[in-house]
Amino acid sequence: MRKFLLNFSIVISVLFLGSGCFLSGGNNVLEAQKFAMEPLMVVKADGSSVELSVAIADSHEERVKGLQGVSGLGSYEGMWFVFSDDAVREFWMKDMQISLDIIFVDADFRVTTFVENAAACSTMDPEQVDCTHYSSVESVRYALELKAGSVKDYGIQVGDTIRWPVL
């Protein structure tokens, strides 16, 4: 009986501690969906910064898939798209379940432009035959996708800089 109680206590402790990460702030939605996360920082013109945890999309396959199938993002979570060259980048919301803010960043890690509240295509076009495309307008090397409303909530502006990797 003593051995049973000891094993039962261990199992309950592991379950309780394991669930703690989900109870402590909710900033791990992507981790829970098997994304490896890395730190990224937005440094604003006034010197303040916003620390984020992002999944990295640096291969063609990862960039094509992006956040498709993700049903939500935690606060301060997103996806950082890394390209090997500078070009005008185009994103669309096909097969997306959530609306996003898309921030376009040049090779010098400066925010050049952004799109706020890009709606999931299925919301506007249930058949997804005419999904809206969102363009960087000018050549960029990176893009950052965050939960819709994040640009406004964090006060992100054109000219802010990204620090990645965070050292």
Image: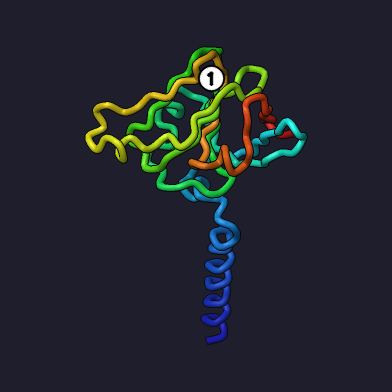
Q: Is residue 133 above or below residue 33?
A: above
Q: Nearer the viewer, residue 106 or 39?
A: 106
Q: Is residue 56 toward the left or the right of residue 134 in the image? A: right
Residue 70, given in percent of the width and then of the height, sits at: 41, 43
Amino acid of disc 1: Phe
**What secondary structure is found at the residue carrying circle 1?**
strand
Residue 105, given in percent of the width and then of the height, sits at: 59, 23
Residue 148, given in percent of the width and then of the height, sits at: 48, 41
Q: Quadrant of residue 5?
A: bottom right
Q: Is residue 158 above or below residue 17?
A: above
**Is the C terminus in the top left, top right, bottom left or bottom right quadrant?**
top right
The residue that label 1 is drawn on is 83
Q: Nearer the viewer, residue 26 or 101?
A: 101
Please tell me which residue is depicted at 67% across the width and 18% down the height of the picture: 108
Q: Among all residues in the image, which is located at the extreme bottom?
A: 1
Please tell me which residue is depicted at 45% across the width and 20% down the height of the picture: 135
Q: Quadrant of residue 121?
A: top left
Please say which color scheme the image uses: rainbow
Other residues around mark 1 within 10 Å, as few (<14) / some (14–19) / many (≥20) = some
Residue 99, given in percent of the width and then of the height, sits at: 42, 40
Please tell me which residue is depicted at 58% across the width and 58% down the height of the picture: 21
